[in-house]
């Protein structure tokens, strides 16, 4: 099993969610986060005054996936979230030691 974390631009969330649903992902956790990478923030104008922000709004998606579809999950996120612009985000994948469904006590891939 794998644990996949993707940090993407917020306006791409619906497209990514739909693409993941099409390959069989049945659940995910989504959080609104802020961060920066190489772009180091951006300059914006608010009420005529220019200001700089070093933390940009992003969306963090967390998915537990079976080994069988983990590569497809990463490919779907990469393909769908890509805008060819700086700040598209990152995808991280970790080995997932165990999963337990709280309601039933199921463990392993049955709990996914």
Image: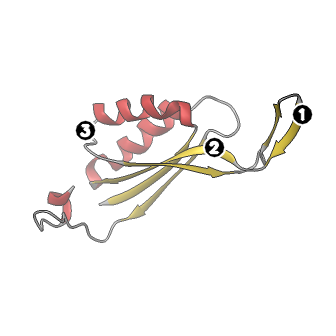
Residue 26 lies left or right of residue 10; in this view the side is: left
Label 2 or label 3, whichever lies nearer to me, is 2
Q: x%, y% of residue 99?
A: 25, 66
Q: x%, y% of residue 98?
A: 26, 70
Residue 9 lies left or right of residue 49; in this view the side is: left
Q: Earlier in the sequence, mark 2 or mark 3?
A: 3
Q: x%, y% of residue 6?
A: 49, 48
Looking at this view, name the residue that lies furthest to the front: 47
Task: Judge whether 108 appears above or below 5 on screen.
Answer: below
Label 3 or label 1, whichever lies nearer to me, is 1
The residue identified by callout 2 is 57
Camera-side residue of 47 and 59: 47
Give how far apart the Cα atoms at labels 2 and 3 are.
Answer: 28 Å
Quadrant showing the C terminus:
bottom left
Using the image, tell me which numbered label, if any, was put on residue 26.
none
The residue identified by callout 1 is 49
Q: Secondary structure at mark 3?
A: loop
> Which image quadrant for residue 58?
top right
Task: Judge whether 33 appears above or below 3 on screen.
Answer: above
């Amino acid at each position: 099993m794998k644990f996949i974390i993707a940090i993407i631009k917020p306006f791409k969330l619906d497209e990514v969610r739909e693409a993941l649903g099409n390959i069989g992902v049945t659940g995910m956790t989504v959080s609104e986060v802020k961060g920066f990478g190489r772009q180091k923030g951006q300059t914006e104008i608010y009420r005529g005054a220019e200001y700089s922000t070093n933390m940009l709004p992003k969306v963090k998606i967390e998915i537990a996936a079976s080994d069988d579809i983990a590569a497809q999950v990463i490919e779907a996120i990469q393909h769908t979230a890509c805008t060819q612009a700086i700040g598209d985000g990152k995808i991280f994948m970790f080995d997932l030691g165990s999963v337990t469904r709280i309601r039933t006590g199921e463990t392993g891939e049955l709990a996914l």
